[in-house]
Image: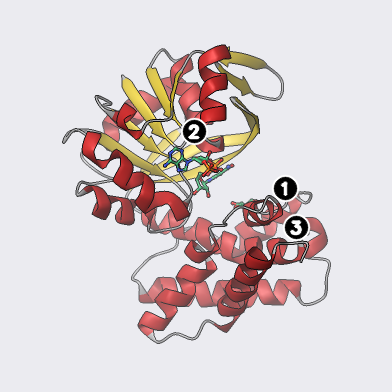
Amino acid sequence: MKIAVMGAGAVGCYYGAMLARAWHEVTLIGRPTHVEAMNRDGLLLDLGTSQEYVAVTGSTEASSVDGAELILFCVKSTDTEDAGQQIKPFIGKDTIILSLQNGVDNAERLGQVLGQPVIPVVVYVATSMGGAGHVKHHGRGELVIGMSSQSQVVADTLRPARIPVEISENADGALWAKMILNCAYNALSAITQTPYGELVKQDGVWDVMRNAVDECLAVAAACGVTVPGDVWGAIEKIVETMPAQFSSTAQDLARGKPSEIDYLNGYIVRKGREFGIATPTNLALHAITRLRELKGVAG
Ligand SMILES: NC(=O)C1=CN([C@@H]2O[C@H](COP(=O)(O)OP(=O)(O)OC[C@H]3O[C@@H](n4cnc5c(N)ncnc54)[C@H](OP(=O)(O)O)[C@@H]3O)[C@@H](O)[C@H]2O)C=CC1
Ligand SMILES: CC(C)(CO)C(=O)C(=O)O
């Protein structure tokens, strides 16, 4: 299949590499340094225990989505509208579009820009960029994709490429479950530049997280969302499974990059206002993270 990835970063490069390894024709659209490295050497897929160069086509041009049957949209939530506008003129009417992004409203926002349906995907993977054209896989890789007439084709394409896929009637709920976990950890880790294991040792931190989560659940209920699974159990598990991890928001701030906080705690605050639900903990976490973002973490 002809596949384009919009946003050749940690997530886009990982799934792009897995698909290219399974003999799909993959074009990754990204920034010049990554694109040059991928076109020169191939994309280095670093699985920890093994490394291999995968043949892909790199491009800096959004027009390279032209002719793609499947698009994986993998930019940060802050870039959804811009990147969507860039690819819009080149998308076919039957092209399948997946949003592989955190936050709960990217598929909807992208769909509004493109004027065609976008399938939301919950991404359970840990990846990072190790340098130009070098993606590191740290664990997991499963995707939960929303139900649509195109979802079975997507699953049949991804599964043989060793990408575990579940089609869910409640992908929105699963996106919320992940966002609630992000609302509990990301801002606290970012503001204090502290890994999770250390964070929760401080008196009161579990209480702050519990308050943030209760607010999120109240807002989810007002939005008519059923959040699946044991939300608090999943939050407790993070400390056990990744005590040394800094949140992606902490990493963004440390690198001086815009974070996705407006689409995490910030989203809860906006939705809370809409429904008349007080969200003081999320409000404080969002505002302080934004201030740290503006001033820089060393400031
Ligand atoms: N990394 C992970 O392990 C996980 C990430 N996620 C989610 O997946 C999404 C993607 O995250 P991740 O891959 O880590 O982010 P990255 O920042 O690594 O990747 C996004 C890439 O897209 C590039 N980009 C943005 N806009 C354009 C554009 N218009 N044209 C070309 N390139 C563009 C960015 O460049 P630049 O930075 O220069 O703007 C960046 O290189 C996020 O929503 C994240 O929360 C979900 C689960 C796990
Ligand atoms: C799961 C968690 C909290 C892991 O760090 C994450 O998704 C993030 O950092 O954004």
Residue 50, relative to residue 182: is it above or below? above
Q: Residues within 10 Å of mark 3 (few under 14, many from 20)?
A: many
> Which residue is labeled 3 in the image?
196
Q: Position of residue 7 (x, y in %)?
A: 45, 37
Say which quadrant the C terminus sits in. bottom right
Secondary structure type for disc 3: helix
> Which residue is labeled 2 in the image?
8
> Which residue is labeled 1 in the image?
241
User: Which residue type does callout 2 highlight?
Assistant: Ala
Residue 274, relative to residue 149: is it above or below? below
Label 1 vs label 2, nearer the camera: 2
Q: Is residue 183 left or right of residue 172?
A: right
Tell whether circle 1 marks a residue whose Cβ is less than 8 angstroms from ligand 2.
Answer: no
Ranked by sequence position, the earlier of labels 1 and 2 is 2
Q: Is residue 126 left or right of residue 71?
A: right
Label 1 vs label 3, nearer the camera: 3
Tell whether circle 3 marks a residue whose Cβ is less than 8 angstroms from ligand 2.
Answer: yes
- Residue lying at 68% horizontally and 76% vertically, measured from the top left: 208
- Residue lying at 25% horizontally and 55% vertically, measured from the top left: 112
Instruction: Tell me the colour scheme of the image.
Output: secondary structure
- Residue lying at 58% horizontally and 60% vertically, measured from the top left: 181
Tell whether circle 2 marks a residue whose Cβ is less than 8 angstroms from ligand 1.
Answer: yes
User: Which residue type does callout 3 highlight?
Assistant: Tyr
Residue 78 versus residue 213: which sits nearer the camera?
A: 78
Ranked by sequence position, the earlier of labels 1 and 3 is 3
Secondary structure type for disc 1: helix
Cα gap from disc 1 to disc 3, whole angstroms: 10 Å
- Residue lying at 19% horizontally and 49% vertically, measured from the top left: 115
Q: Is residue 51 left or right of residue 89?
A: right
Q: Position of residue 183 (x, y in %)?
A: 58, 65
